[in-house]
Amino acid sequence: MLSKIMGGIIMLLAVLVISVSFQPRVNEDKAVLDERISKEAFLEVYKVLMSPRCMNCHPKGDVPLQGDDSHLHTMGVTRGDDGKGVSAMKCSNCHQATNTPGLNQPPGNPTWHLPPADMKMVFEGKSPRELAAQLKNKDLNGHKTMAQLIEHVSHDKLVLWGWDPGEGRTLPPLQHVEFVRQFKLWVDKGAVLPD
């Protein structure tokens, strides 16, 4: 009888040791998996952000880009302090509330603009890691929390315009719903910077 009790105690101790040693490994594996998922999700997001529909309004200079080839905007247009143009060359002079009908006509949105001069939010020329770091930094992303960024990419009408750009313009490489899903996945799994 005593040997059965001792055998049971030894078995219980063995199970406890295995259980305790296994738990950190499970947590470590989950952390590694979450990191990988987050990085992969951002690489999908990055494809959209680098498409002409996004990058053209997030240039490295003060001249917006246009067209699927992302050439400098014609007509001498520049950003201006508020991102809405300068003097008589305001964005709203050509960009009306809706897309102008016809092939490659001026696209439209009631709030058409570039980011303001004090928060340019440059996408052009950024690596995935650089752009992810910029998006995470409230001093560089328009003072937005991650939750506010999700709201921005989900519902902002100017962002949504990218999937309704008018005739003659390509769409971003992901459907909007998938872009938002990947953005949320990146954030939910830790907003990890890709390699």
Image (cartoon, rainbow, N blue to C red):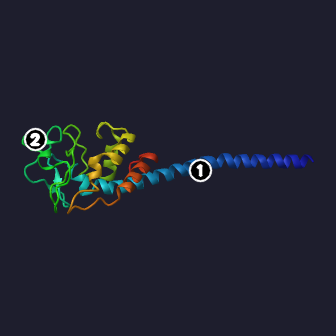
Q: Which mark is residue 26?
A: 1
Q: Which mark is residue 86?
A: 2
Q: Residue at coordinates 20% horizontally, 46% vertically from top-left?
A: 112
Q: Residue at coordinates 82% horizontally, 45% vertically from top-left?
A: 9
Task: Label 2: state its secondary structure.
Answer: strand
The type of residue carrying mark 1 is Val
Q: Position of residue 98 (x, y in %)?
A: 20, 51
Circles 2, 1 touching at the beta carbon (< 8 Å): no
Q: Residue at coordinates 15% horizontally, 55% vertically from top-left?
A: 106
Q: Is residue 172 above or below residue 91?
A: below
Task: Label 1: state its secondary structure.
Answer: helix
Residue 187 in sight here: yes
* Relative side of 73 to 158, left or right: left
Of discs 2 and 1, which sits in the foreground?
A: 2
Residue 43 in sight here: no
Viewer-side residue, 166 vs 194: 166
Distance of label 2 from label 1 (alpha carbons): 57 Å
The type of residue carrying mark 2 is Val
